[in-house]
Amino acid sequence: VQLQASGGGLVQAGGSLRLSCAASGGYFGYYAAGWFRQAPGKEREFVAVISRSGEVTDYRDSVEGRFTISRDARDASKNMVYLHMNGLKPEDTAVYYCAARTSVRTNTIYTTSAAYDVWGQGTQVTVSS
């Protein structure tokens, strides 16, 4: 599977963006997925993750209630994962990466970047104050 992230941009504080991650080259229904971000001079950090089934999600504390990760609820094999971002803050500025990994269990989630072996190229999100 290959991943292609898109949807980043420049937005004012309080605004919204939707990031998309398109998977190709394999059956995406075997994969758990996640979004990570990396700001200049900082380590890559977990933002949100979702299970193969789409039924289990987790978020870092600072985005809980503002961001929503999703995949097609009717068919998790559909090759898209989204990150809906509302109430954006300047501290959300970073390059956002989507990631995926195969998962034997349908409801397992993975919150560490080391757990993922497929990465998209990243999309820049800049939030102005």
Image: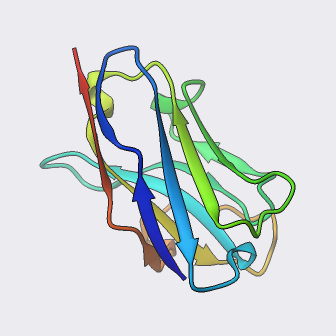
Q: What residue do we see at 33% from left, 32% from top?
A: 92
Q: Quadrant of the C terminus?
A: top left
Q: What residue do we see at 54% from left, 58% from top?
A: 34
Q: Position of residue 35 (x, y in %)?
A: 48, 54
Q: Quadrant of the N terminus?
A: bottom right
On the picture, is 35 further left or further right than 55? left
Residue 30 in the image: above or below residue 35: below
Residue 119 in the image: above or below residue 11: below
The answer to whether residue 110 is seen in the rendering is no
On the picture, is 55 further left or further right than 8? right
Asked which quadrant contains residue 51, the reply is bottom right
The answer to whether residue 2 is seen in the rendering is yes
Residue nearer the viewer, 66 or 43? 66
Q: Residue most toward the right? A: 74
Q: Position of residue 26 (x, y in %)?
A: 63, 85
Asked which quadrant contains residue 69, the reply is top right
Q: Position of residue 2 (x, y in %)?
A: 48, 79
Residue 85 in the image: above or below residue 99: above
In the rendered view, how is the structure colored? rainbow
Asked which quadrant contains residue 89, the reply is top left
Q: What residue do we see at 58% from left, 76% from top?
A: 101
Q: How many marks?
A: 0
Q: What residue do we see at 87% from left, 55% from top?
A: 74
On the picture, is 120 further left or further right than 33? left
Residue nearer the viewer, 79 or 67? 79
Q: Position of residue 71 (x, y in %)?
A: 70, 53
Residue nearer the viewer, 22 or 126? 22
